[in-house]
Structures are given as C-alpha cells and as structure tokens.
Image: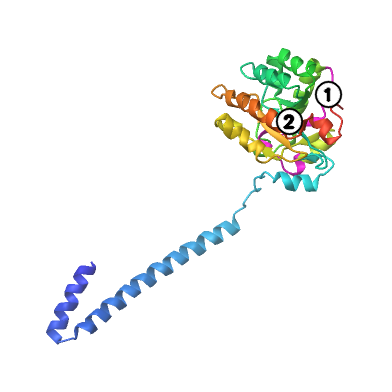
Amino acid sequence: MKERIVKWLLVMGFVFCLPLTDIMSVYAADGARQLLKADLQENAERDLSDLKAETEPSGQDPEQPVDLRILQQRYPEIFFLQGPTDQKRIALTFDDGPDPRFSNDVLDVLKQYNVPATFFVLGSKAVANPEIVKRMQNEGHVIGNHTYAHPNLVEEADLGTLESEVTRTEDALNEITGYRTKLFRPPYGFLYNELVEKLGKMNYNVIAWDIDTLDWQEDPPEVIASRVVDNIHPGAIILMHDGAESSGDRTNTILSLQQIIPKLQEQGYEFVTVPDLLGIPLEK
C-alpha cells in the first residue's frame, strides 16, 4: 500500500512539477497520521482493559513467603535463625529424613566425631523407618517436626493443612520417641505471619537457619564444605539434608561432613543440639 502511495505521489509531482521535498513531506505526514492512529487505538484498548480490570472482582491475592529475617524480628519468642554469638557453639541440622540410603551414614560420621545434631524428620518417613529415628535418639541427637509429607505450606495457604501435617507427625514421633517435640522446621523455609502465629499457639518453636549448604544441589563435597567453613560464626545454625527424593543423592553431604566437622573443631567450635544452642526445651 505504501509503495503505491509513493509511486502516485511521484507521478503527481512530475505532472504538476512539485519539488521532491514536498512529495516526501506529504509521505511523512501520511506516516505520522498512521502512527498516530495506531497509538490512539492502542491507548483505547489499554484504557478499556484497565477499566475492565477495575470493574471485575480481582479475588484474594495469593500468600507469599515472608523473609526468614523478617519473621525472626516479628516473632522473636517463636522464630529462631541463630543462637547467641558470645560463644563458639554451633548446631548442625538435617532435614527430610529418615532415609535408609543416607541417614545411617550421616549418623556414622557424627558418631565418629562425637557430634550431636538435630534432625527435622518427615512423619511419613519416620513411620516407614522408625528404627533410624530410634537410633538418632539413642545416640544423643534431637528430633524435630518437618511435617508429614513436605507440602509447600504457603502455597497451600490453609491453617488446617498446617495443623494436620504437624499434628500427624507429632503423634507419629511420640509413638517412636516417647515425647512430643517442640521444634518445627517448615518445608522450603516457607511461612507467613498467620502460619507462625498458629505454630506458636500449637506450642512450637520454629527453627530456621543462617548457613545454607545448598547440599540438595549435589555439588562436590568441598563446595558444600566451603559454604560452611567460609561463613561460620558463633551461634550458627547450619542447614543440611540426610534425606532425598527417589532420584536424589546425599553422598556428597556425607563426604562434606568429613571436612566440615574436623576443620571447625580445630577452630575451637563446639557442636551442640538446637535446644542447647538456643536454651529452649526440646519437648512440650
């Protein structure tokens, strides 16, 4: 279409002796009118879309995970990221077990170095592997609640789901250990205000972390170890995993412990359980 306009203008210019600059001015004006028309149409469509959005119900905004540091500031009596920084005491913690492929090997390393740890176990795996939970307890480790089936509690956005997952796991662990744990760690570290408040009403302390090994990425053992050794400080709570999905492998986690523990012991750090580090009870 534009080519035909140009040809027509050239012919008319030749016939009526119009200067070439005038011809191009006419063409430019035509292009400007086309752009203006398109812009007006786009703005009209946008205004209509905005108006439609304002008149239609938007529904409830989905919940989003709240930063762990913010939760600790809002709920200092319930939510913990680290322990006191005036002593060289630290806590190793493990999530997602008990897993018969890896948990016993983790326990073997901890026993080798005489290190107590805190295990946040899944209720479903505890029911399937009660003998590993008993070994954890008998060897001086502390057991915490990590829900029954590892749901994303923020995505669920339902207090009933939280209560069911936590209570079911608490009951299962009580059958195995003989006590009701007071320690809870949320899957993925995902919580928001109402969930923390609900856990407080259920008489739980929420235990997060301030050193994340990212061992679930299955990096080489020296990489996992460096994330701890290079960032260690008094009062640290270290996140690791002794359990994995069917395709996961925690071999490098086990090997990294052989580097982490002796290096930090040489630096004068003492490994303790979370309740000992924080000065809180381990059971209700």
Q: Residue furthest front?
A: 266
Magenta residues span: 178-195
Q: Nearer the viewer, residue 186 or 253?
A: 253
Q: Nearer the viewer, residue 275 or 183?
A: 275
Whether residue 222 can be seen here = yes
Residue type at mark 1: give it: Arg
Q: Position of residue 235 (x, y in %)?
A: 78, 39
Q: Position of residue 240 (x, y in %)?
A: 66, 30
Q: Can you tell which of label 2 and label 1 is closer to the viewer? A: 2
Under circle 1, the secondary element is loop
Residue at left offset 29%, top offset 77%: 28
187 within the magenta span: yes
Image: 67 above or below 142: below
Displayed quadrant of residue 25? bottom left
Q: Position of residue 180 (x, y in %)?
A: 83, 23
What number is the disc on residue 180? 1
Displayed quadrant of residue 50? bottom right
Q: Are marks 2 and 1 in contact (CB under 8 Å)?
A: no
Q: Nearer the viewer, residue 215 or 259?
A: 259
Q: Which residue is mark 2?
A: 265
Q: Residues within 10 Å of mark 2 (few under 14, many from 20)?
A: few
83 sits left or right of 97 in the view: right
